[in-house]
Image: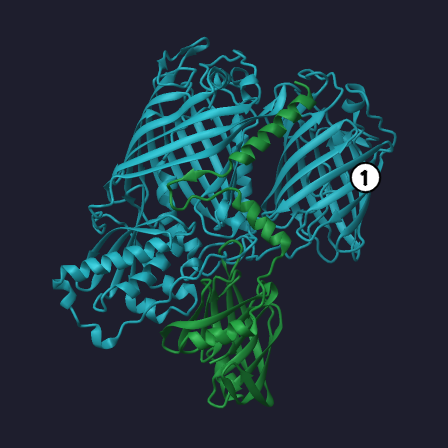
Chain colours: A cyan, B green
Amino acid sequence: MRARGIMQTTAMALVVCSISAGTASAQGQEQLSPPLLQYPQERVPSFNAYGLPGLVDMPTAEMAPDASFGATVSHFGTTTRATLSFQVLPRVIGSFRYSLLENSNLPGNRDGDYYDRSFDLRFQLLKEGTYLPDLSVGLQDFIGTGLYGAEYVVATKEIFPGVRVTGGVGWGRLGSYQSFGSTGTRPSNDVGRGGTADYERFFRGDAAAFGGLSWDMTDNLRMKVEYSSDDYELETTRATGFDRKSPWSVGGDYVFRNGNQLSLYYAYGSEIGAQFTVLTNPRTAPVPGGNETAPVPVSPRRADQAADLGWTTQPARQMQVREALGEALDDQGITLEGLSLEADRATARIINRRYNAAPQAIGRTARLMSRALPDSISEFVIVPTTGGVPSSAVVIRRGDLERLEFDAADAIYDRVAVVDAIGRTPPVFADQYPKFNWSLAPYFRYSAFDPDDPLRTDYGARLSASLEIAPGLELAGAVSQRLGGTIDEATYSADTQLPAVRTAAPLYARESDTSLDRLTLAHYGRPGKDLYSRVTAGYLERMYAGVSGELLWKPVDSRLGLGAELNYVRRRDFDQGFGIQSNMTPSGEIPEFNGHVSAYYDLGYGFHTQLDVGSYLAGDVGATLSVNREFANGWRVGAYATKTDVSADEFGEGSFDKGIRISIPLNWALGSPSRRAENITISPITRDGGAKLGVGGRLYGRVRSDHQPEMAKTWGRFWR
Amino acid sequence: MRPTKTLRRRAIAALAAAGLLAACSTEKESVNALDVFGELRAKLSNANPPPLSEAQIRQSLATVPGPIRFLEVGNRGGQALIAPIGQNGDYVTWASAGGQNVVFRNGFAVQSRGLGGDLMSSDEDALLPLIRARQQGTAPYVMRFLSGDNDTIVYNYTCNVLPRGATDYVAGEINGNATAVEVHCVSETGPDHVSRYVVSSDGYVLSGEQWFGQLTETLTYRTLR
């Protein structure tokens, strides 16, 4: 039922998405907003102490530019709030907040420090026009403990150039000071457990008015004044050190060119406060287009050579072609693994080591083929592979390449075919396998939201190695040596009603500084057209060993993928060596088998969704829904929620598993090409319900980028 | 744990982690996370490469056979000498030793690669004949750039070509009569701009101060040989 809430919210967001969708881009990819270079053109509104568009502490009806990603830290009185916000859609902004209330006697406090997590959502119903104001409705802390629980309807209108007036009505916290009426009885909040969206509370109870004024004095300076309807009852009755003397607060913002904001305020007649908001926008890039060196130009054929087939009977010349092409591609960050030459067609089997956008690797390969291959060849087939397994075949006519080199990228897109690689993949060269790679690198691990220490970290060194025995057959492992940190100091609490599949993590962290993170033998294959397979055996992750099998159906031109995964798991010893221990935990036995079926769908407008249904690690049965907003430069911002047959009480704090995932591509930050990305998962609480096995190499992520729907999004890079 | 101890531990952890960041690997495309800071430093220091000296240009003209052009990338002040590396019909690709390319069509820049914020392609079929003919007139002109999100930004311009009279062209080994041409472009989708060219009597664009996108701003080029 609670998961239904998430789903309803998601569905609602998607409806809004399709309503407010903008124009289609060049390759038929729907876009929510027009493309941007380095900075959004729209005005960036002031962010308030809750890390959302607002005044000092009160909300406004404003929205940030589409896709704005913000991080705010604010402090006044005894309250410190750290908030991540994301403009999910042009008219929907969401946020996740971690707050500290000092000197408090709330249940769950540690030495007076009370930590709280909260999620907000704000929907803009009306956009400002000549006469009408912006009008928004917001839910504050709608899924957490309810500590900040409030709802509001607010309007904002620019009345003079740069001067905006805001007025609104609030419930919950925002209806607690000088309320003018009431809309029924508001059920009390459940500080302590949280995690559920409590519809019964929404817009119930006392209502009060709030408002204020903001004035953009210059492009960089802004003043704001507000009247708050929040009486800060908890902070004044359940904590000491904060005195709310007045509903009035005044503040000033300094806004940097990139939208970052530094604010100072005098809040509630007693406190000096400050905040800093860092804003970035995944639709922009520090160096749009990247700063990697230029590709080589296409070499047009000479008409008199087109009929020369002499090379077909000269193996030495073919070898020369192969070596020249292999060397030139290697220089561009592309490995030539195989090449088949027919009289009028050449097929290159490649590994794209460098480019985040597959079309860029395809385009560079095609251009080098035009320079290296005999003139009689009129068709190029390029087969990108991942881990030795072909994921698609791109068919390009050489004449199109020559004719359209200086046209818009759309022109060649219309002439290219992306098809299944089955039956088109040349064998690998005999000298390509086995391949051995290793790396020694630092690692940094964190564990957040432990009330004893909200951010625990570990650091150390990790030695990773892989041996690709044959295409698709890989032996890989990683050993890490912890050098320091505090994760091992986390308290292990046996407070769970389910088999301790994840709550036992502190036992693993404290047992040994040297750990075998993984050691697996994996086979990746193509059992047939549209099909991909994986079998992984060994030490699959830090807590589990076993065997994992996966099958994926994903046609090369389809937005839909379907998969199934079955796992046999054995619990590893706490010291994370080679030992295996019984699956029996103090709170129950971990089933040996788990698995799920998955559906993946590219919804368009940059949204991607995944639904997993099956049996989780602790034996609970249910489903996980993930929705990501994805950007063609590799940025992904998304949320997931898992609801299984475990009740909220059995699950414990948080009521059900949920979280936020953010992926930031390194090449976006660097400007230079790289396929690496920084992946961050923020899970407010780790419990045993809805937990999945952490096996590496899941198929969808490996094959998707080389398929037509993904290539279409980044096809502009074909000629880059 | 109390904050001071935690903070001290974190500071040590951060330092140790920073010291370890220089990872080693046999993988060819491994990226060092410290590069991020290197890039930032480069941006903060705003260090432009020193301009090419007359002596460097003379030396290149003496040692490199064939056509040479001088290139300056507007807002970054980077300068380079470029030489042709490929031809496809009217389009000639010129490259710098640093791995940047600019494609010229009859001497008029139509694309770049490797400059950052590159002009990915343009439709100059109607504009270029007017410039080459040094003739007053109006023509459409399209410029395409990659957005921060790998989408294509298209600017549709209407350009006025305004011949500005005869001029002497003196650069490198070229010394002769030519015509100055000014091109004013306006658009509802992109920033308005003015570009200036010097065109030879046979319709070759000898030099240009050409608007080349919001990142590059003005691309300056001169034919030296």
| Quadrant into which the C terminus of chain A falls | bottom left
Question: x and y percent of residue A114 in the render?
Answer: 69, 21
Residue A310 position, x and y percent, is: 14, 68
Residue A437 as seen in the image, left or right of residue A639: left
> In this view of the protein, can residue A145 be seen by the observer?
no
x, y percent for residue B135? 54, 89
Q: In which quarter of the image is residue A270?
A: top right
In terms of image quadrants, where is residue A341? bottom left
Task: Tell how many labels.
Answer: 1
Which chain hosts label 1? A
Residue A606 point in image, percent of width and height: 49, 48
- Nearest the viewer among A9 and A387 is A387
Residue in view at x 73 percent, y 37 percent:
A49
Q: What's under tag 1, amino acid-wise?
A: Tyr
Horizontally, is A536 left or right of A116 in the view? left
The residue singled out by tag 1 in the image is A265
Label 1 secondary element: strand
Q: Residue at x 21, y 77 (%)?
A: A304
Q: Is residue A527 visible?
A: yes
Q: Name the foreground residue: A349 vs A424.
A: A349
- Left of B84 or right of it: where is B9? right
